[in-house]
Amino acid sequence: MARDVEKYIHDLLQKKGAIQMTLIDPQKTEVGECTAIAVEAEKAGTSAIMVGGSTLASNSDLDDVVRDIKEKVEVPVILFPNNVSGVSRYADAIWFMTLLNSGSSYYHFDVQALTAPLVKRLGIETLPMGYIIIGDGGAAGYIGQARGIPYDHPELALGYSLAAEILGMRFVYLEAGSGAKAPVPPKMIALVKKYLDVPLIVGGGVRSGESAKVAVKAGADIIVTGTLVEETERVRESIREIVSSIET
Ligand code: 1GP
């Protein structure tokens, strides 16, 4: 059944204050394992499953993973695309995103132009989002040819975030990169949150309830965790620790 994922997110934010989403990368994990992670994450209280990864190349692998997860979980499955291969007809929604501080026009608007007709034809709900790389951004920063914003320059993150909002994007994502040694600094989150009206997503390097809490206290609305579920056998406990640290 089609659902209004954007409304679902806003309703949850209203109710819970902040939420967590679980990122699964089909390039790193095989289908059955992806689904097992999603099922455990849902039991632990995750609000959505995001599927994607910086180096994902196989659309059929993505389809297999999204279809399998959709059969077993109730929370929405949202695509987190890295390229034209990141679209699946089985998903509930797609972060329709632009890497604002890329040095390449491909990641600003060309890949979106190549993908938009397919997204429209499939009728996938679109969630327009400005994506901003902080620091080197790991694989996302490298592939996206980002000019990462230095950790000690929050004013630059504010500028890009407000530009995204003024241009009509309905979410902003500050991304330190999957597996980042240090998450987005709280000072940067706080400055952006002070002026931004759309929901603020923060991810990269968040691996504990404590660091999730710090980010939410600073102003993050949505915390994305990925590496956490790849590295541990204890998916349910790890996600539960994050969720219970940030939701009211
Ligand atoms: C990456 O922000 C996400 O796009 C998640 O990062 O893998 O470090 O949790 P982690």
Image: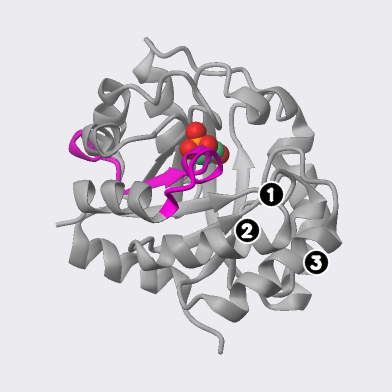
Q: Residue at x 43, y 60 (%)?
A: 41
Which quarter of the picture shows residue 213?
top left
- Residue type highlighted by circle 1: Thr
CA–CA distance in space, label 2 to label 1: 6 Å
**Percent position of residue 58, x then y:** 85, 53
Question: Considering the numbered disc 2 on the image, is that residue within a helix, a strand or a loop?
Answer: helix
Q: Is residue 94 visible?
A: no
**Discs 2, 3 touching: Cβ within 8 Å:** no
Q: Which residues are magenta?
A: 216-235
In the image, residue 226 lies in the stretch drawn in magenta? yes
Per the rendering, the mark at residue 156 is none
Q: Residue at x 24, y 30 (%)?
A: 190
Task: Please say if 120 is above or below 209.
Answer: below
Front in this rendered view, residue 242 or 185: 242
**Percent position of residue 210, x then y:** 23, 33
Question: Considering the numbered disc 3 on the image, is that residue within a helix, a strand or a loop?
Answer: helix
- Label 2 or label 3, whichever lies nearer to me, is 2
User: As drawn, which residue projects farthest toward the left?
Assistant: 248
- Residue 113 lies left or right of residue 244; in this view the side is right
Quadrant (top left, top right, bottom left, bottom right) of the N terminus: bottom right
Give the residue pinned by disc 2.
34
Give the residue pinned by disc 1.
29
Which quarter of the picture shows residue 9?
bottom left
User: As drawn, which residue projects farthest toward the front?
Assistant: 233
- Residue type highlighted by circle 2: Cys
Quadrant (top left, top right, bottom left, bottom right) of the C terminus: bottom left
**Percent position of residue 79, x then y:** 62, 59
Which quarter of the picture shows residue 71?
bottom right
Earlier in the chain: of badge 1 and badge 3, it is 1
Q: Is mark 3 within 8 Å of ligand 1?
A: no
**Discs 2, 1 touching: Cβ within 8 Å:** yes
